[in-house]
Amino acid sequence: MGAHETQFVATVVELLPNVTFRLELEVNRAQVIGHAAGATQANFVRLRLNDKVLVELASHDKTRGRIVKVL
């Protein structure tokens, strides 16, 4: 959405209710909450523990993001 969003590779570490996931970023091992967005949600991609994903963090809240691609 905004020009200041950043993308990182992350690993799914916990499955949460309402199709949200706890993700651990590979860059600094920080944990963020992410939800499936776009093609990931429309095509019903099932995520499991230890799956690698590409997560996009918003500029206003670095603890939340959306999963844009499964790697």
Image (cartoon, grey):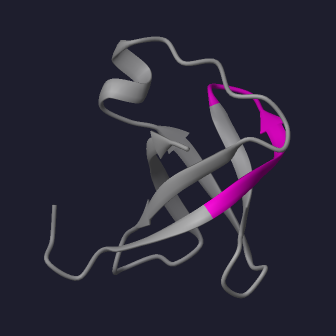
Left or right relative to 2: residue 69? right
Left or right relative to 19: residue 50? right
Residue 8 in percent (x, y) is at 51, 70
Q: Which residue is found at the position 58% from the left and 49% from the top?
A: 53
Residue 42 in percent (x, y) is at 34, 15
Q: Which residue is found at the position 57% from the left and 64% from the top?
A: 9
Q: Which residues are magenta?
A: 10-19
Left or right relative to 22: residue 44? left
Q: Which residue is found at the position 65% from the left and 61% from the top?
A: 10
Q: In this orientation, which residue lies closer to the viewer: 25 or 58?
A: 25
Image quadrant in which you'd find residue 46: top right
Most distant residue in the bottom direction? 28
* Location of the C terminus (image quadrant): top right
So how many labels did they put on this image? 0
Magenta-colored stretch includes residue 13: yes
Magenta-colored stretch includes residue 14: yes
Q: Which residue is found at the position 85% from the left and 37% from the top?
A: 49
Is residue 16 depicted above or below 54 in this figure? above
Give the dominant element type of the magenta stretch: helix, strand or loop.
Answer: strand
Left or right relative to 69: residue 52? right
* Location of the N terminus (image quadrant): bottom left
Residue 37 in percent (x, y) is at 38, 36
Image quadrant in which you'd find residue 58: bottom left
